[in-house]
Image (cartoon, rainbow, N blue to C red):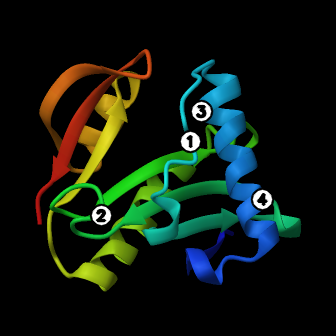
Amino acid sequence: MIDWTFESFESLSCGDLYDILRHRQDVFVLEQKCFYPDIDGKDQVARHLIGRGAHNTFLAYMRILGPGDYYEEPALGRILVTPEARGRGLARTLMDEGHARAKALYGDVPLRLNAQAYLKDFYESVGYEIVRGPYDEDGIPHYEMLKAA
């Protein structure tokens, strides 16, 4: 069972913010050996979706940016499942939850994301189509993808 929280930046506890930044660093910087500016000034305008399991264990995360905050459409980003939680279908559950939260906030509108190339097939399986790419972002091949309304 996953317990989901969905907060604005101002509503995040210090502990939640610490967990978010730690796990983003662990996955995107250390695990993927990619040195990039994770703290990019967009967290303050984003909504933050956190999935926790038993004993309040951090399992999954994404941030959702509103229309105009990054793209014309709402955008999902910094999507991760912790290494300990992988292989259980949680990524699909996270995407479903993120889509539902974005729809509740912004209505039935297209959603955009930047996908690492190795995850292209996964994002296509949850309804996204390539609109640009591949292109290099911080040394990793990416695709810009859009999910129709």
Marks 2 and 3 in Cβ contact (< 8 Å) = no
Which of 90/115 is in front?
115
The residue located at (65%, 34%) in the rendering is 27
- Report, in whole angstroms, how far the alpha carbon at label 2 lies from the one at label 3: 21 Å
The residue located at (22%, 65%) in the rendering is 68
Q: Earlier in the sequence, mark 2 or mark 1?
A: 1
Q: Amino acid at mark 4?
A: Tyr
- Report, in whole angstroms, how far the alpha carbon at label 4 lies from the one at label 1: 13 Å
Which of 72/141 is in front?
72
Marks 1 and 3 in Cβ contact (< 8 Å) = yes
Label 2 secondary element? loop
Please say whether residue 60 is visible from this viewpoint. yes
Asked where in the image residue 25 lies, by quadrant, the reply is top right
Give the residue at mark 2: 69
- Report, in whole angstroms, how far the alpha carbon at label 2 lies from the one at label 4: 23 Å
Q: Earlier in the sequence, mark 4 or mark 1?
A: 4
Q: Residues within 10 Å of mark 2 (few under 14, many from 20)?
A: some
Instruction: Please indicate whether residue 128 sits to the left or right of residue 49 in the image.
Output: left
- Report, in whole angstroms, how far the alpha carbon at label 2 lies from the one at label 1: 16 Å
Q: Residues within 10 Å of mark 1 (few under 14, many from 20)?
A: some
Give the residue at mark 3: 28
Marks 4 and 1 in Cβ contact (< 8 Å) = no
Q: Earlier in the sequence, mark 2 or mark 3?
A: 3
Q: Earlier in the sequence, mark 4 or mark 3?
A: 4
Q: Amino acid at mark 3?
A: Phe
